[in-house]
Image (cartoon, rainbow, N blue to C red):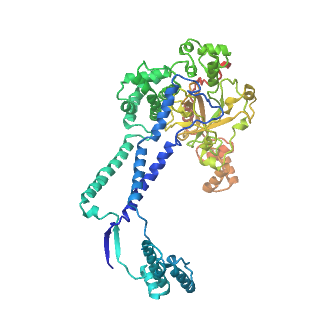
């Protein structure tokens, strides 16, 4: 059998090979580009019951035009970017190759007699002959005189193929050749085609191909892989640059435990990050800090400097990502005071409000006068909403009635959590056994601070019916509630996804429980914010919505029975004043003893029946020891047993597990009731 290698001199193969490679690379890139350009991946604000609808436009803030320009620039960057250049050039090259080099694929090399004669594979000899005669009347050379030269030659070729097909279906030798070799004329020469024109390999253009292969394999491919790998190595899983992560780790490791850290300390660390110093190398540290301070003070301009004013929104939009990355790293150090300062800074960035001070709840409202608020004693939104409108305007320093109405409406729609019950539970158990996998169940009400007191909620509404899916995934109920709307943040240039992050703190060492991660509370029904005072106090099940949230404990329950104390922290990322800080108590109990199982075990290992055991028990000279099998049986019957020597020590250890817990001001009570 002869074989040879042939080059694609007629451009019959290589264009399709190149087109296949181009389309294979272009399709996913084009899909990603179009998805981003259309804004499908961008967050959009939805109208949800209980949400705050005011934004920079409706409030007519001084920087509304700047935020609109920022949004336009972000949208423009989604459309005009490097992907667009790649997509345009790539599809242009596809069109060029298709129009200039691609030819119609010839099927002359494929031989199927039934297809050529347009016959079914079940055709009989009579049907084959009849069909052949009909086609011969059309394609016979004597019938082609009236056609043009090129058409006549094509039809003559078709007539020859018809003859071959007819012979293949009627001649035994031809049929045998098709079965063995796939061709009516028998064995054919095998050719191996190379999808490259010969002149590019053996002609004067061959050095170009060598250079092309060198650039492709030796330069571009290593460059692409190296760039990808470098990005993987230089950024953490949370998206922080490794230099930034190392900076945060060093600062936290060198933290002075006796020093109280504030949000401004965290801000200094954030401004020294790699992302900030690389993007704003033209600005000094003092200039960067002045931009942030200007933002949280709601000053319209940055000291009259146009350059700093232009960089302001870009810098502010970058800060939350870095703060959230810092929080993720700080959790590993288990110091909740640093985490609290970081959340204060995050909220200050979103609300353009001071991260420190006693009046932060009021300063986050729109149109307020900072000096007026800080000069009066009222500090909480709950107290503000108990005042007459005129008095509230004096507290906030707002003289315009329309602006005052907006500020009070925002204050009334800031969601607060009223915890009704928080207890540790084990799926399928009524108690918390030692070393069990435990989660915290929190039942709470979302309320507005204008709603006073708390409705009476029947205990039956706290009960949860567990099924097999709850045993597999106890936290699945967290996803059953509606998603939280975007937070009210008119001074921030992007939409803010509102949520609470849950943490559990051990009372013994005042640190996060080992292995703690932030438990995000992102789905809560805010419909209670729209209730009247009467509806709230009535507390009807179809009116007042009871919410729940579960947090899985990162470590098993303590190995011994006793009472253990913790604290629950719920930190909101967008609003001041609606955090939760309450005490928790975990009672670890030994599971109840199965009396029948103990008796069966006693009979299996000790022999005899129950009557014999009673008689032996009565004749014992001394009481059995408590930790023996006989002692266990005697204790079940209510008889006396001998205590082991170290029982008193164990009782002392149990007493040590119970620590005195001081009351914590959670700021969740209605201030107006005090």
Q: Residue at x 57, y 43 (%)?
A: 437
Estimate the x, y position of residue 674 in percent, counting from the top left.
Answer: 66, 18
Give above or below for 429 relative to 367.
below
Residue 527 image position (x, y, % from top left): 68, 33
Residues 71 and 389: in front is: 71
Identify the residue at the far front of this view. Answer: 146
Q: Is residue 409 something that shows in the picture? A: yes
Quadrant of residue 603 within the rendered picture: bottom right
Residue 549 position, x and y percent, is 61, 37
In the image, residue 33 sits, relative to residue 562, either above or below, namely below
- Which residue appears at 59% of the width and 16% of the height? 396
Q: Is residue 456 left or right of residue 125?
A: right
Q: Quadrant of residue 288?
A: top left
Q: Residue furthest top?
A: 375
Q: Quadrant of the N terminus?
A: bottom left
The image quarter containing residue 497 is: top right
Residue farthest along the bottom direction in this orientation: 172
Q: Nearer the viewer, residue 203 or 422?
A: 203
Q: Position of residue 200 (x, y in %)?
A: 28, 61
The total of numbered circles placed on residues is 0
Viewer-closest of 233 and 62: 62
Which of these two is toward me, 144 or 190?
Answer: 144
> Can residue 510 be seen?
no
Location of residue 155 with respect to 541 vertically, above or below: below
């Amino acid at each position: 059998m002869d074989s040879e290698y042939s080059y694609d001199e007629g451009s019959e193969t290589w264009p399709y090979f190149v087109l296949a490679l181009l389309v294979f690379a272009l399709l996913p890139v084009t899909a990603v580009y179009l998805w981003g350009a259309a804004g499908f991946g961008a967050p959009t604000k939805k109208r949800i019951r209980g949400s705050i609808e005011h934004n920079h436009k409706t409030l007519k803030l001084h920087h509304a035009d700047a935020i609109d320009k920022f949004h336009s620039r972000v949208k423009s960057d989604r459309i005009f970017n490097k992907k667009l250049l790649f997509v345009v050039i790539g599809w242009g090259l596809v069109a060029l190759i298709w129009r200039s080099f691609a030819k119609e694929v010839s099927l002359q090399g494929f031989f199927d007699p039934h297809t050529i004669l347009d016959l079914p594979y079940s055709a009989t000899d009579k049907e084959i002959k009849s069909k052949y005669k009909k086609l011969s009347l059309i394609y016979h050379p004597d019938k082609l005189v009236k056609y043009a030269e090129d058409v006549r030659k094509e039809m003559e070729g078709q007539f020859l193929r018809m003859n071959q097909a007819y012979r293949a279906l009627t001649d035994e030798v031809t049929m045998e050749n098709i079965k063995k070799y796939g061709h009516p004329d028998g064995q054919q020469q095998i050719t191996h085609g190379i999808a490259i024109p010969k002149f590019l390999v053996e002609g004067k253009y061959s050095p170009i191909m060598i250079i092309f292969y060198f650039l492709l394999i030796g330069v571009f491919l290593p460059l692409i892989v190296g760039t990808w790998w470098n990005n993987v190595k230089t950024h953490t899983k949370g998206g922080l640059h490794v230099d930034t992560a190392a900076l945060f780790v060093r600062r936290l490791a060198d933290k002075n435990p006796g020093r109280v850290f504030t949000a401004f300390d965290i801000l200094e660390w954030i401004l020294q990050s790699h992302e900030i110093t690389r993007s704003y190398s033209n600005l000094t540290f003092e200039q960067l800090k002045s931009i942030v301070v200007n933002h949280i003070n709601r000053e319209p301009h940055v000291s009259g400097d146009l350059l700093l004013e232009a960089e302001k929104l870009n810098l502010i939009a970058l800060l939350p990502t870095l703060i959230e990355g810092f929080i993720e790293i700080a959790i590993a150090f288990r110091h909740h005071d640093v985490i609290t300062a970081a959340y204060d800074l995050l909220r200050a960035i979103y609300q353009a409000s001071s991260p420190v001070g006693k009046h932060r709840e009021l300063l986050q409202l729109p149109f307020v006068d900072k000096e007026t608020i800080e000069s009066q004693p009222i500090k909480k939104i709950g107290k503000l909403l108990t005042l007459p409108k005129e008095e509230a305007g004096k507290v906030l320093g707002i003289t315009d009635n329309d602006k005052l109405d907006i500020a009070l409406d925002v204050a009334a729609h800031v969601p607060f959590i009223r915890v009704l019950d928080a207890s540790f539970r084990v799926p399928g158990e009524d108690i918390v056994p030692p070393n069990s996998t435990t989660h915290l169940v929190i039942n709470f009400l979302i309320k507005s601070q204008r709603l006073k007191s708390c409705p009476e909620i029947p205990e039956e509404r706290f009960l949860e019916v567990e099924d097999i899916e709850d045993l597999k995934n106890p936290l699945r109920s967290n996803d059953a509630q509606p998603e939280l709307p975007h937070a009210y943040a008119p001074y921030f240039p992007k939409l803010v996804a509102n949520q609470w992050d849950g943490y559990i703190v051990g009372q013994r060492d005042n640190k996060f429980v080992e292995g703690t991660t932030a438990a995000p509370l992102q789905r809560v029904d805010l419909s209670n914010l729209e209730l009247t005072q009467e509806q709230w106090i009535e507390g009807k099940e179809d009116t007042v919505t009871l919410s729940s949230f579960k947090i899985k404990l990162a470590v098993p329950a303590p190995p011994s029975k006793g009472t253990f104390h913790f604290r629950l922290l719920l930190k909101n990322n967008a609003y001041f004043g609606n955090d939760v800080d309450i005490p928790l108590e975990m009672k670890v109990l030994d599971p109840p003893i199965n009396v029948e199982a103990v008796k069966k075990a006693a009979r299996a290992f000790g022999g005899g029946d129950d009557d014999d055991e009673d008689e032996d028990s009565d004749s014992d000279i001394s009481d059995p020891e408590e930790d023996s099998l006989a002692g266990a049986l005697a204790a079940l019957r209510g008889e006396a047993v001998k205590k082991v020597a170290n029982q008193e020590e164990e009782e002392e250890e149990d007493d040590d597990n119970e620590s005195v817990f001081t009351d914590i001001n959670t700021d969740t009570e209605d201030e107006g009731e005090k």
